[in-house]
Amino acid sequence: MNRYPMWKNGLIIVAVLLGLLYALPNIYGQSPVVQINSESEAKPDQAYIDDISQRLKDQNIVFNSADIEGDTVIVRFDDLEQQSLAKDFLEDNLEETRVALNLKSNTPEWLSDLGGKPMTLGLDLRGGVYFLLEVDMKAAADNKKKQLRGDINSILVKEKIPKRKLNWSGNTLSMEFKTEELLDQAYEILRKDVDELAFSTQTSGTFVLQGTLTETTIDQFEEKALQQNLTTLRSRVNEVGVAEPIIQRQGQDRIVVQLPGIQDTTEAKNMLDAIATLEYRPTDMSNNAAEAARSGRIPAGSTLYYDRQGQPVLVKNRVIATGNQLIDASSAVDPESGSPMVNVRLNSIGASRMLDFTKANVGNLMAVVFKEQTPVGTNPDGSFIYETKEEVISNATIQGIFSNQFRTTGLDSPQEASDLALLLRSGALAAPVRIVRERTIGPSLGQENIDSGVMSVQIGFLLVMVFMLIYYRAFGVIANISLAINLILMTAFLSIFGATLTLPGIAGIVLTVGMAVDANVLIFERIKEEINAGSSIQNSIKSGYEKAFSTIADANVTTFIAAIVLFAFGTGPIKGFAVTLSIGILTSMFTAILLSRSIVNLIYGGKKRLKSIAI
């Protein structure tokens, strides 16, 4: 009557053992580490590690170990003070490197090989920086319009269809043609090749073709801009070597970035909202730049810039290649002059254009224009205000023919070369972003939060255990065993799925403890009611579990739905609460109903004539 088949008991045992195994990494703790990422093309090797180790020993900085993980050197410490001293020293003494503070798990290798890893801790527990970024969707729309205008112009030129004008007015692109025949040709071609616009014609007096952006198209490219920004930001953060960053969208036009272990907000901000690129252009050698700067008369087809020494430079508007066509970029030192530089590698399109240009222009000048935009505020209408920086960083003579690989010089410092290489490698943002909120949490505050959260779980767990033990006796012991395994399973699930544990998440665990024991209370009270009604003990146990199941299931399903809604529409802290609550509901259903009954069956199921039970 009250016995599970062997296979069911076996599955329960396997589930509990797996839970114990994957919860185990959390008992090993974490070590403070310093991460060292080289900005040069050379990969770290044992000689590099030995050099770093010797330098730290010479400064009497105590560390545990120095190892290579991928392309990153990890130096482990016992305390935060030595970690901080090491970071400051290495930043000042290592060239072409990025040095960052972080925390690394002490999980044994055999456990890591089995997929075991500790829970990911949120910023409120681990320390780090939090940014809320707002995406400039108006700029995203403007960029898309420029792209569409350029694409349509290229199509018309290719098809040899002359036009009189090609201009945007709001969300409508108007094209005027000389004859109705040209209008019809353009209409037939463009409506097939450009599906982002809805085309219509006007033939009253003038021959005009209009392409209108639909709301669906606008929504689509705003979504693409947001997704590309997410990808670019992840790439930038990965380049710096931040472990377990959180980069996710929030609402229609915002992105949340959490960087655990990072304390330098200035460096992080420069990395996130910078919009920097390079343009390689021909220098205008037919006109005098100084005369153009003095008179203010800029020759048609050229733009006046200034180099870093303040000298005017006339640059043709023709763009040979841009930062968007870069495949790779790395900082280095020019072996001839000793000045910082960036080694550049272009994709096939950029390489082809560079090859064609250099073939025809050996001995002429080519300028490298550096462009950077930084959001500094917003207008009353909500549009972004930018601080724009444009300058010529190099205006050098083309010495020979080259295509996909070359170098860019003229940079002020190794740090500038390193930062520029990072931005070029990670790609351009599809739309500018502005930091609207930032918060820094120190590691000491994070540890205080961890200690407070753990203490709250321990106190809540202990009080519940004492109550159940006093009130339900032997069945209270069974409930307490189920409750302990429930916490272990929750920890295992959080670890396996990489869910981020936050302070509100700990509150969700405490709430789950109460909910889990509540299911046992319902079952035990039902068993007592059946016994008091004169039913046999074995029948009472069976009825208690079966009749209480529907009530427990209804309560947990409704709570689970609420948790899903919280996760779908909540922000960071609320999501953390919803995650632990959802996992806790699933594990408590398993432990309170299946596991506790399995234990009861093992103790009482084989006894045919039970006179009493300790409940």
Image (cartoon, rainbow, N blue to C red):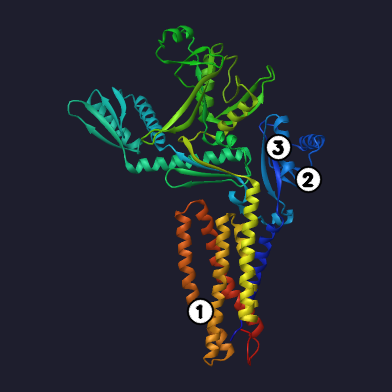
Q: Residue at x 30, y 33 (%)?
A: 170
Q: Nearer the viewer, mark 3 or mark 2?
A: 3
Q: CA distance from mark 3 to mark 2?
A: 15 Å
What's the residue type where badge 1 is placed?
Ala
Mark 2 and mark 1 lie on one chain; the one further toward the N terminus is 2
Say which element carries label 1. Answer: helix
Residue 582: give x, y in percent of width and height: 52, 62
Q: CA distance from mark 3 to mark 1?
A: 58 Å
What's the residue type where badge 2 is placed?
Asn
Say which element carries label 2. Answer: loop
Q: CA distance from mark 2 to mark 1?
A: 55 Å
- Farthest residue in the left direction? 204
Residue identifier under label 3: 87
Can residue 182 be seen here? The reply is yes
Q: Nearer the viewer, residue 376 or 145?
A: 376
Q: Does 113 sit left or right of 342 as displayed?
A: right
Residue identifier under label 1: 548
Mark 3 and mark 2 lie on one chain; the one further toward the N terminus is 2
Residue identifier under label 2: 64
Reply above or below: 416 against 133: above
Mark 3 and mark 1 lie on one chain; the one further toward the N terminus is 3
Residue 128: give x, y in percent of width and height: 61, 44
